[in-house]
Image (cartoon, grey):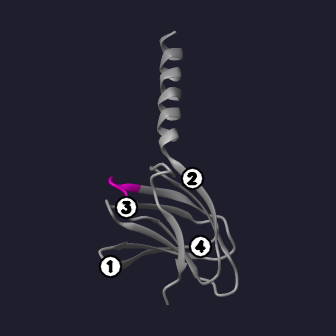
């Protein structure tokens, strides 16, 4: 009985924490970037996978300063943390094909800004 209670409690905890999380399956057009956050009031944790045919670059941006955080090849994993007020930028590296990413983050989609912007060359 105790084991059943622990399993139910863990399931309830997982359900409540996933209700606070957001997900996005996003296509990033050639020559574009996908920006996530920048206005969050707590640390932003982003995980996911590059499910498209081209590599994407991960950047962080805060106070006008942009820093490259890594390159994620197709089928590669995305794991990154961003500070309060820091923007996560996922940039399509291709000038021919669209990129496609699946991301999960620890913020509600209702309280986190998401937008496309031109890729910076």
Residue 43 placement: quadrant = bottom left
Q: Earlier in the sequence, mark 4 or mark 1?
A: 1
* Residue 36 x, y percent position in the rendering: 47, 64
The label nearer to you, 4 versus 1, is 1
In the rendered image, which residue does mark 1 sit on?
A: 64
Does 40 sit above or below residue 61?
A: above
What range of the chain is rendered magenta? 39-44
In the rendered image, which residue does mark 3 sit on?
A: 39
Q: Residues within 10 Å of mark 2 (few under 14, many from 20)?
A: some
* Residue 99 x, y percent position in the rendering: 65, 73
Q: Residues within 10 Å of mark 1 (few under 14, many from 20)?
A: few
What residue is shown at x 47% (from left), y 61% (from top)? 113
Q: Earlier in the sequence, mark 1 or mark 2?
A: 2
In the rendered image, which residue does mark 4 sit on?
A: 73
Residue 61 placement: quadrant = bottom left
* Residue 116 x, y percent position in the rendering: 55, 73
Q: Earlier in the sequence, mark 3 or mark 1?
A: 3
């Amino acid at each position: 009985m105790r084991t059943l209670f622990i399993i139910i409690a863990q399931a309830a905890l997982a359900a409540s924490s996933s209700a606070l999380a957001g997900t996005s399956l996003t296509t990033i057009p050639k020559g574009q970037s996908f920006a996530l956050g920048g206005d969050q009031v707590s640390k932003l944790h982003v995980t996911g996978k590059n499910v498209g045919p081209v590599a994407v670059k991960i950047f962080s941006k805060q106070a006008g300063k942009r820093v490259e955080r890594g390159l994620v090849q197709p089928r590669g994993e995305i794991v990154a943390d961003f500070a309060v007020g820091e923007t996560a930028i996922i940039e399509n590296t291709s000038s021919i094909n669209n990129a496609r990413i699946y991301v999960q983050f620890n913020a509600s989609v209702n309280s986190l800004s998401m937008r496309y912007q031109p890729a910076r060359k």
